[in-house]
Image (cartoon, rainbow, N blue to C red):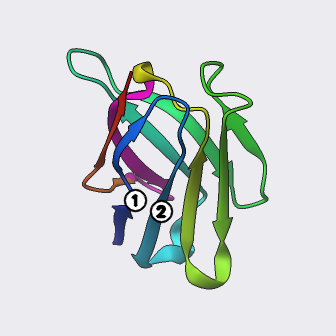
Amino acid sequence: QVQLVESGGGLVQAGGSLRLSCAASGSIFVIKAMGWYRQAPGKQRELVAYITTGGSTNYADSVKGRFTISRDNAKNTMYLQMNSLKPEDTAVYYCNAMGDLRAYWGQGTQVTVSS
């Protein structure tokens, strides 16, 4: 089992920045890749960015150039640096870890961007 705990969400004005953290614990050796998803009210959950164990990254077009995903293997923690935030970035952000047999999810952290 893998446990994921997000932190760092909050309320910020448009143009501002936030950094989300996702701390992993448990059987972290099964993790193949990690990512951030988000879900806005009335919308489907969507992929924001992911990072593989080899360090390769990928981003949704809507966040390219504004968000940066990274991880600190020594701390078993993944980050999402979010800059130039827009009101449309408002959502619950979820940490995801892909294991050998299943995906793991955190509880989510709310990000609200005011205009």
Callout 2: few (<14), some (14-19), or many (20+) C-alpha neighbours within 10 Å? many
Q: Which residues are magenta?
A: 89-103
Res 53 quadrant in image: bottom right
Predominant SS of the magenta segment: strand
Which residue position holds label 1? 8
The amino acid sitting under disc 1 is: Gly
On the rendered structure, is 6 left or right of 67?
left
Does the stretch in magenta take in 87? no
The answer to which of 114 and 103 lies nearer the viewer is: 114
Q: Is residue 57 above or below residue 30?
A: above
Identify the residue shown where x is 67% and y is 33%: 66
Disc 2 from disc 1: Cα separation: 6 Å
Residue 109 - label: none
Residue 17, percent from left and from top: 54, 45
Q: Is residue 5 above or below residue 103?
A: below
Please identify the quadrant where the C terminus is shown: top left
Q: Are marks 2 and 1 in contact (CB under 8 Å)?
A: yes
The answer to which of 59 and 80 lies nearer the viewer is: 80
